[in-house]
Image (cartoon, grey):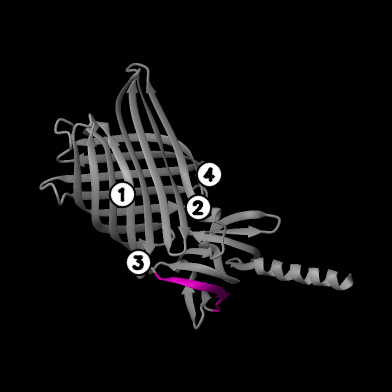
Amino acid sequence: MRFLLIFLLFTSVIVYGQKNDTIVHTNGNILTGEIKRLDYGIITYKMEGMGSIDFQTTKVKTIISKKKFEIKLTNGLNYFGSIDSSNDGRKVKILLTNTTKTIDIDDITELYPIKNNFWLRMSGNLNLGFNFSKGSGINSFTSSGNIDYRKKNSYYSLNWNNNFTAQKDSLLSSKTDVNFVIIHYIKNNWSLYSQTGMNKASEMGLSLRLFQSFAGLYDIVYNSKNRLNSAIGISGNREWSNDSSLSANNLEAFLSLNYKMYKYISPKIDITTDFTIFPSLSNYGRLRIEYGINSSYELFRNFIIGLNYYYSFDSKPIDILASKEDWGISTTIGYSFH
């Protein structure tokens, strides 16, 4: 019995020790617990008796852990290894199979334990907006959101945005966008990009557009506060007009520029803007443009208010009598999880 108790105690110490990651704060404090993730300039850390806490990576002097991590750097390189301290300023050593790399902590854009929980790799937000004018009887409703998931060398994102405008029992206009994006990191800031989705825009005579796009994506800037990338590729779609009397297949090139500015320490601020042009390869002279900007500000923990704007242009809409452009502004309130 004594031998069994000693064995269990010894085993529990080993298991507990395996969960211990050490972070040395810039003020000299030593924190012991478990690293959940590092992204968007924030490290999420679970401490015994305190639960999970978030703090900026600029407050970290060094990290020590024997666990295996996936580590993405600002220069686009990915490493897989454990982490040890360095005596050279705010740096860490990445312990790889056959070598050791010394890097600045500020150069780490993402860090995830390889055996991390599925839910800890997810983030996103859910938003709702409603406006009503008694004088005109016009009301508008907006719902939007995104769910993001990161895993080894890949990023997945589901995004949606619905805008409806109605007067009494009549639907005046509607616009819906749903996109599923897959980004697979290659090396040196390059990634493979795939987007599958659907669009509806009654103002522009579009009942439905189903599309599939493929591109190469390059991160121009990717650090703890900003991400700027550009993508160039090809997209195929099928469109139906509002009355379904017209349909067409299209092949387009596309060029996009995307910027994201974030501050994920309270109060959280997130501003994302996307600009994409679609010159047609199958319908000479046709050009489509999509632009959007979404911003959010944290009111209190995880609850946000947002201001969103979109603009769409089509030089040759499928319905020749429809408008060539559509735009809208909405305010929302929502919940974010990260």
Question: Within the image, what quadrant is residue 53 found in?
Answer: bottom right
Ranked by sequence position, the earlier of labels 1 and 2 is: 2
- First of labels 4, 1 by sequence position: 1
Query: Residue 169 placed where, x, y %?
Result: 35, 18
- Mark closer to the chain start, 2 or 3: 2
Q: Which residues are magenta?
A: 77-87
Dot 1: element:
strand
One can see residue 305 in this view: yes
Amino acid type indicated by mark 4: Asn
Do callouts 1 and 2 mark residues in contact (Cβ within 8 Å)? Answer: no
Left-right relation of 23 to 311:
right
- Residue 99 in percent (x, y) is at 49, 83
- In space, the residues marked 1 and 3 are separated at their CA atoms by 19 Å
Cβ atoms at labels 4 and 1 below 8 Å apart = no
**Residue 264 highlighted magenta (yes or no):** no
- Label 2 sits on residue: 122
Residue 82 belongs to magenta span: yes
Q: Where does the image place residue 205, in percent across and percent down from the top left?
A: 22, 32
The residue that mark 4 highlights is 302
Q: Is residue 211 left or right of residue 315?
A: right
Give me the residue at 59% from left, 63% from top.
Answer: 35
Residue contact at pointers 1 and 3, CB within 8 angstroms: no
Question: Do we see residue 20 in this rendering?
Answer: no
| Quadrant of image for the N terminus | bottom right
Q: Residues within 10 Å of mark 3 (few under 14, many from 20)?
A: some
Residue where numbered disc 1 is placed: 274
Q: Are marks 4 and 3 in contact (CB under 8 Å)?
A: no
Rounded to the nearest angstrom, the CA distance separating label 4 from label 3 is 31 Å
x 22%, y 49%: residue: 277
Residue named by callout 3: 189
> Which residue sits at x=48%, y=77%?
102
| Mark whose residue sits in front, 2 or 3 | 2
